[in-house]
Amino acid sequence: MKNLLLFFTAILMAYSIYAQNIEVCNTCAVSTLKNAVSIAKDFDTIVLKKGTYKEYNILVDKPLTIIGENYPVIDGELKGEIITIVSDNVTVDGLFIINVGTSYTEDYAAIRVRKSKNFVIQNLVLEKLFFGIYLEKSRDGKVFHNKIIGDAVEEYNSGNGIQLWYSKNIEIEHNFVQHVRDGIYLEFSDDCLIKNNVSTKNLRYGLHFMFSNNDIYQDNTFEKNGAGVAVMFSKKIKMLNNIFKENWGTASYGMLLKEINDAEIIGNTFEENTIGINIEGSNRIIYKNNNFINNGWAIKVRGACYTNSFVENNFLYNSFDISYNSKINDNIFNKNYWTSYTGYDLNKDGIGDVPYRPVKLFSYIVNRTPETIILLRSLFIDIIDFSEKVSPVFTPDNLLDNNPLTKRITW
Amino acid sequence: MLKILKYSFFDLMRSRWSYVYFAFYLLLGIVLLFLNNDLSKAVITLMNVIIVLVPLIGTIFGVMYYYNSKEFTELLLAQPLKRSSIFLGQYLGVAISLSMSLILGLGIPFIAYGLFKSNAIWDFYLLLITGTFLTLIFTALAFNIALTNENKIKGFGYAILLWLFLAIIYDGLFLMSLVLFEDYPLDKLSLIGTMLNPIDLSRTLILLKLDISALLGYTGAVFKKFFGTNFGLIISFVMLVIWVILPVLRIVLKSKKKDF
């Protein structure tokens, strides 16, 4: 009996030694993170105390939990990559990482995860970075509640906030990304969830998809980015309840869709963008319950877009609701609310009795000769728009909303 | 001159038309603000009214006033008064009373709505300033037409034609020339084209406040760069002032030489 108790105590002790804490501080026995990682055993926890650690090229090659207390600073002194994770089951929590090296040949990141599973990266603050969090051929991880503030000036020598490359099943939640090239960038990454992030003032895109399928992004806010959000060459993406705001500029969009098929765009708000959504070569997309408010162009259709349906959206005070550059239309517009609708509703069922033509002649003219935008809201333009409305010549004549609503839709 | 200004002004203040004009703006302002709970829509409608209706009323009213008060003018001419002060006085009387109707008519409902507390106050000032400028410009043009044409019908005809040209036909020609020369860089041409027409100039100034997102598009950036800066704003106002001064100068010169 006594022996048994001793045995259990021994096991317990062995276990507690096994998963031990390693404390790192400037005056401790272990004074660098690199050192701590090298002496740590699998499944240890490394606790970084408050202080500044001038380190780079830290290779985490075993399953560890690295926790910072009161945001210790890891200063890379612009020398290169800071933390590289190559093992499964790594957690990094609560660090303040600054001064990632900039290179024209290598993508240095503040934290890179390479070919790993089940990682958690959370509560980090990254500043003065090149790439922020770089996930490479990794899966089943979580990037949660990080704050990434870059100081990007030019596209060619700046990196992305959160970048995914050939990664699968990643959750990116509650992150705040600012002033980098692309806020969040997904390339060849499937089954990811991007939720509740705020991506603002980035040089290029707030969020950028390339060749990534079956992803969901929802409840995110994208504001004042160089060119908004770009979704390209991807299938089956769900875009739900996001806010796209004030993406202003000569080639700026709230959202840019290029070669996107079978997507769902539901419940988003597009406000004060130069172009709300720019669509090119995208098919079978459902647009439902979106708000388009005060955009220059709410939706600009560039061509090769078939079988899309625009149902129950609000188009409020856009300078142009829809713009087409061809006479062919294969898309459905139904039951939307348009503020520029001037018809009547005699039987009072909430549906206007006269169909609405969302494409104006003037938007066709502006497409052809962009300088004519200076004549916007001129009386002459109103007159030609009216005559085009009565008998369409230049705009697709089957492009109609047959059931325009007379009241703004709420959901 | 001031005395004549005072006479014309009070004469107009007593006339029915000033009240109708004032009441129209008052009603418009009230309806737009209180029955339509959307400020941005109200300002857009107001802009349309100001750039179309203000010039029309300015021209018609100016011509009408000149022809109606012709006998009084001839009586004044018999007195030892400077001709320029007689006509300038009359012109200013009409222009100021029209501007006052506009400013008060729109201002009262806006003040009642609580505009001073909102951010739209500067847009609204811009609306009123351009409206006033347009009144000054088109009344002066109307006086020019009336001075040149003894025949009332002809005068009215020209006045309407002038309005029609500047408000609609000019834009049509402008649009056609832009589409015709689309292979060439057009930003300068379109800027100059806008500057030359006071209605277009006022419209663009107001637009930059309202349709900012559309104008920030591909070419809009050029216009934004020009009109959006203080330099552009100053140039635009200088242009508007020139548009007032030139017709007024012609009133003075023409009236000196005219044989009554």
Image: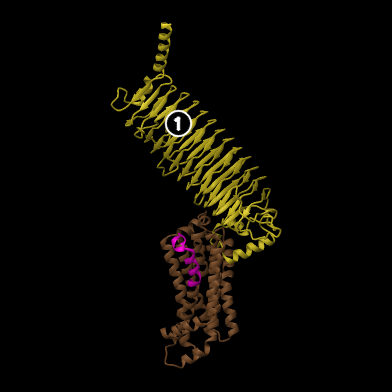
Chain colours: A yellow, B brown
- Foreground residue, A37 or B198? A37
The chain identifier of the residue carrying mark 1 reads: A
Q: Is residue A357 left or right of residue A166?
A: right
Judge whether residue A406 is colored magenta: no
Tell me the residue at 48%/57% (across/down).
Answer: B222
Tell me the residue at 60%/43% (across/down).
Answer: A265
Q: Quadrant of residue A76?
A: top left
Check disc 1: other Cα within 10 Å, few if <14, some if 14-19, many if 20+: many
List x then y, in percent, for residue B221.
49, 56
List x then y, in percent, for residue A223.
48, 47
Q: Which residue is labeled 1 in the image? A: A121
Q: Is residue B155 left or right of residue A392?
A: left
The furthest residue to the left:
A27
Check the image and report above or below for A262 versus B77: above
Q: Quadrant of residue B81?
A: bottom left
Check the image and report above or below for A253 versus B143: above
- Foreground residue, A96 or A278? A96
Q: Main secondary structure of the magenta part?
A: helix
The furthest residue to the front:
A1
Tell me the residue at 65%/48% (across/down).
Answer: A311
Q: Secondary structure at mark 1?
A: strand
The residue segment tinted magenta is: B103-120
Tell me the residue at 60%/63% (across/down).
Answer: A381
List x then y, in percent, for residue B237.
44, 68
Q: Quadrant of the N terminus of chain A?
A: top left
Judge whether residue B105 is colored magenta: yes
